[in-house]
Image: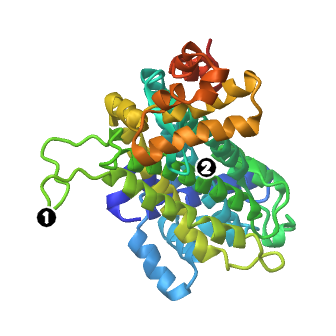
Amino acid sequence: MIPRYSRPEMVAIWSPETKFRIWYEIEAHACDAMADLGVIPRENAEAVWKAKDVTFDVARIDEIEAVTKHDVIAFLTHLAEIIGHDNARFVHQGMTSSDVLDTTFNLQLTRAADILIEGLQAVLVALKRRAYEHKMTIRIGRSHAIHAEPTTMGLTFARFYAEMDRNLTRLKTARDEIATGAISGAVGTFANIDPAVEAHVCDKLGLSPEPISTQVIPRDRHAAFFAALGVVGASIENIATEVRHMQRTEVLEAEEFFSKGQKGSSAMPHKRNPVLSENLTGLARLVRMAVVPALENVTLWHERDISHSSVERNIGPDTTITLDFALARLTGLIDKLVIYPDNMLANMNKFRGLVMSQRVLLALTQAGVSREESYLMVQRNAMKVWEQGADFKTELLGDADVVAALSPEEIEEKFDLGYHTKHVDTIFARVFGED
């Protein structure tokens, strides 16, 4: 991923230095386990640990790989150069390359998931704070992008919180599912390596042994992992799209924080654009882009092929780095989002009471008018608001059929905003689990 959309901690997980360090630890821990079993001499296992403080030479490994055309062999050759060829003769005993590659990849994904979980938790903190801040800030709810009925900005934040809280559960599940390792040898039969070696290595790395591997760890785990990331990306875009709508000049119910010295356009000095939300929309597309290839990686020939390898070398770092950056950006956007309550009320009142039509409809049916007739009575007055700019309540009070069923006081009561916020506390208790 390009530096513009990257954060150092996540990038470090995918660096060649980190990868080779994990490869080394897998091989060293495996040697320890084999020495415990008496398969290799203890002194050889101990000799491998002489490299524990060594910084592996990435350029040298690349140089060897240019000849061998095999990355794991290139690394093992470099390791032998460091600890001595005699000491290295039992390294990788009974193992296959996928034991190292797959266990490393899953460990990297597990570490990446830990960072993503922290990022998502930060988003939740921001959403909860803003939800309580604007718990009773009235705004118009919309369906089909058209005014529907009153809601609150707090409920908007709360529903995004609930969505992201579900995503947190998904991420934790994905993290647990991907945290497996396999040191099972060629085609996964343990013919040349004891299962105790796998158990030891996984324990040292904080992973669980894969119950059954072939020559690879099953890729349904990875498909589920990247699918979970894809859903998080979709939710990020869901929030970003709402912000983009609210910042439209004709709406302006909220806008991204515009810092001192910030410029919105090279041509138009007045511009204040929702650039963060638009950026998040694009980043979400990149995150979701990994889902289909990850699903297609599930199907491999027999016990192993490498059709998945090139895919994972890309989507592993790119997707986690992108999502990490997006979560951090989203947290900042929510924290600093500027809310305009007065504009929200002005927008809601733009059609002069029209958004209370359902209350009047229901009151008429309660008063004994048929639903069909009630609908016609309300709609004919509503259309005057749409088409003539009339005041909805005034039209209702002037409609003989309406006032025959409802008193002026009853009609007046149907325009009380408090009616629409009476269950906000109940919804908040459901979302946040608080009284």
Q: Quadrant of residue 357?
A: top right
Where is residue 105 shown, x and y percent of the image?
A: 61, 60
- The residue depicted at 52 percent of the width and 34 percent of the height is 355
Q: What is the secondary structure assignment of the residue under circle 2? A: helix
- The residue depicted at 32 percent of the width and 35 percent of the height is 336
Where is residue 382 shown, x and y percent of the image?
A: 53, 40
Quarter of the picture holding the N terminus: bottom left
Front-most of residues 32 and 359: 359
Q: Amino acid at mark 1?
A: Ala
In terms of sequence position, does the residue under pointer 2 or pointer 1 come before the other?
2
Q: Where does label 2 land, which residue?
A: 110
Quarter of the picture holding the C terminus: top right
Q: Vertical placement of 388 versus 342: above or below?
A: below
- The residue depicted at 77 percent of the width and 76 percent of the height is 300
- The residue depicted at 61 percent of the width and 59 percent of the height is 104
Q: Indicate which disc residue 33 carries.
A: none
Q: Residues within 10 Å of mark 2 (few under 14, many from 20)?
A: many
Q: Where does label 1 land, which residue?
A: 267
